Image (cartoon, rainbow, N blue to C red):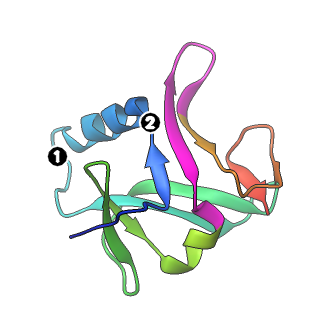
């Protein structure tokens, strides 16, 4: 696994803790990695991908802040500099994306446009 000096995305401490908690759950497939990416769709044009997956042809396998990450190199232009956080409060729960490349985002924060 390659360690990247300038990671395309960063995780907050809360996100790291939640990802590691999920990876430590019973039955977690240790061969899977955290996939970070984008796909077409959503109310703003592009939606974020965040979930555990097996390596696909063409994926880069990175280690970012101790988390094994899969990333399609063509997605980096949309994600570079993004911070992923975990919100665990009563009003907001889940992963959030702070993307400096987004020109607009939807109300729920899961889709964006550049």
Q: Residues within 10 Å of mark 2 (few under 14, many from 20)?
A: few
- Read off the magenta span: 78-94
Residue 85: image x %, image y %?
Answer: 51, 36
- Counting every numbered tag in the picture gives 2
Q: Residue at x 37, y 76 (%)?
A: 60
Instruction: Name the quarter where the C terminus is drawn.
Output: bottom right
Q: Residue furthest top?
A: 90
Q: Is residue 88 magenta?
A: yes
Decide: marks 2, 1 in contact (CB < 8 A)?
Answer: no
Residue 21: image x %, image y %?
Answer: 26, 34
Q: Residues within 10 Å of mark 1 (few under 14, many from 20)?
A: few
Residue behind mark 2: 12
Helix, strand or loop status at disc 2: loop
Name which of mark 2 and mark 1 comes first in the sequence. 2
Above or below — where is 96 with respect to 7?
above
Q: Residue at x 41, y 36 (%)?
A: 15
Q: Residue at x 43, y 62 (%)?
A: 6
Residue 54: image x %, image y %?
Answer: 30, 69
Of the pair 69 and 55, the residue shown nearer to us: 69
Q: Is residue 19 magenta?
A: no
Of the pair 42 and 13, the residue shown nearer to us: 13
Residue behind mark 1: 27
Residue 64: image x %, image y %?
Answer: 34, 55
Residue 78 sits in quarter: bottom right
Above or below — where is 106 with respect to 43?
above
């Amino acid at each position: 696994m390659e360690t990247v000096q300038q990671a395309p995305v960063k995780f907050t401490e809360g996100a790291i803790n939640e990802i590691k908690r999920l990876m430590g759950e019973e039955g977690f497939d240790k061969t899977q990695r955290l996939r970070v990416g984008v796909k077409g769709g959503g109310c703003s044009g592009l939606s974020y991908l965040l979930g555990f997956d097996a390596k696909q042809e063409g994926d880069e396998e990175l280690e970012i802040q101790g988390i094994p990450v899969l990333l399609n190199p063509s997605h980096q232009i949309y994600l570079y500099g993004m911070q992923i956080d975990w919100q665990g409060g009563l009003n907001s729960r889940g992963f959030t994306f702070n993307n400096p490349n987004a020109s607009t985002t939807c109300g729920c924060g899961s889709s964006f446009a550049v």
